[in-house]
Image (cartoon, rainbow, N blue to C red):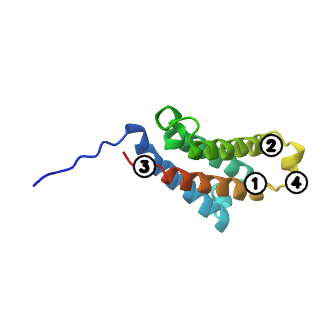
Amino acid sequence: MTTTTVQVKPKSFFLVPLGAAAALLTLGMLAGWTAAFGLSDRSAFLVLFALGFAMCAFSPLGAGAVYGWTNPRHLAGYLLGGLALVLSLGVLFNLPFAAVLSDRMAFIVLAGIMAVKIFIGALYPRR
């Protein structure tokens, strides 16, 4: 009988709790439960941004030196991450392009960007 061992990167361990927290926050926001916990739409947006920023740092999208900086998955991740960053700065500083969106709609847009980035991250080969 042979056994196969899989080496898990220590930093990938943090993706599951961070992803679960982001999913619960998104579910709570969509269901309207966040107000019961004292979170406004704006504060929920900023918490989701912080969770997404941390998730990106721990994901394969944050390992450009390993997978290659010009990898198409990385390029898509950079583009989406830049879009999320610009959106977050717009909401944080009340810039005119973000003022068109309500804080709730900005939250939904950010959650959608994060969902696409999670899908892209799932396309990386498991080592």
Instruction: Residue 57: give x, y in percent of width and height.
Output: 54, 38
Q: Residues within 10 Å of mark 3 (few under 14, many from 20)?
A: few
For image coordinates 66% across by 43% down, the residue present is 81
Can you tell which quarter of the image residue 12 is in? top left
Please, what is the three-letter code of the amino acid marked with disc 3? Pro
Under circle 3, the secondary element is loop
Earlier sequence position, callout 2 versus callout 4: 2
| Gap between marks 3 and 2 measured at Cα | 34 Å
Q: Toward the viewer: 52 or 62?
A: 62
Q: Toward the viewer: 91 or 114?
A: 114
Please, what is the three-letter code of the amino acid marked with disc 2? Gly
Labels 3, 4: front one: 3
Earlier sequence position, callout 3 versus callout 4: 4
- Tally the marks: 4
According to the picture, the residue beneath numbered tag 2 turns out to be 90
Q: Which quadrant would the N terminus be assigned to in this image?
A: bottom left
Instruction: Residue 62: give x, y in percent of width and height.
Output: 53, 38
Q: Toward the viewer: 67 or 120?
A: 67
Under circle 2, the secondary element is helix
| Gap between marks 1 and 2 measured at Cα | 10 Å
Labelled pair 3, 1 in contact (Cβ < 8 Å): no
The residue furthest top is: 65
Q: In the figure, is residue 8 to the left or right of 29?
A: left
Please, what is the three-letter code of the amino acid marked with disc 1? Ala
According to the picture, the residue beneath numbered tag 1 turns out to be 106
Q: In the figure, is residue 19 to the left or right of 87?
A: left
According to the picture, the residue beneath numbered tag 3 turns out to be 125
| Gap between marks 3 and 4 measured at Cα | 39 Å
Marker disc for residue 100: 4
Instruction: Residue 21: give x, y in percent of width and height.
Output: 53, 53
